[in-house]
Image (cartoon, grey):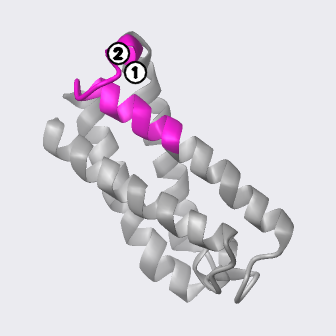
Amino acid sequence: MTLFAVIFLILILFIVGFQFALILGAPWGEFTMGGIHPGRLPAKMRLAAAVQILILIVFGAVTLSRAGLGLSGLYSLSRIGIWVVTAFFVFGTVMNLATSSRKERLLMGPLNIVALVCSFLTAIS
């Protein structure tokens, strides 16, 4: 379980960094949110990236706790929370693989698949 949780947390850090770069104006709009905003994201989409960062931090905390790597006070909540995380990545995987943005499919699709597998394996361990 620990290995899968660590891989998951590394992916989360990568995605949080990506979202933070989008907030700062990185021209990577084609890689996210359906690719409908090539280049820099508009202000509203940057706010959405900030919300995604908060969600990902919560998911990281739940996974960290579930794997017994920290935040032991959340452990009982993490028993259910890890399934919420897994469900989120099921949805995210479907959306990222179904997007019309080829760049998003090629980058975020595989990342979501790995995060999904790791969260599931953490959940069942």
Report x, y in % for residue 79.
37, 18
Query: For the C terminus, which image quadrant?
Result: top left
Q: Is residue 91 above or below residue 19?
A: above
What quarter of the picture does the N terminus occupy?
A: top left
Camera sees residue 61? yes
Q: In which quarter of the image is residue 40?
A: bottom right
Q: Which mark is residue 78?
A: 1
User: Local crowd at mark 1 within 10 Å, few (<14), some, or many (≥20)?
Assistant: many
Q: Which amino acid does label 2 sit on?
A: Tyr
Element at badge 1? helix
**Residue 37, x across and y down, in percent:** 76, 82
Q: Which residue is located at x 49 percent, y 64 percent?
A: 17
Which range is magenta?
57-75
Residue 46, by quadrant, is bottom right
Q: How many marks?
A: 2
Question: Does dot 2 land on a helix, a strand or a loop?
Answer: helix
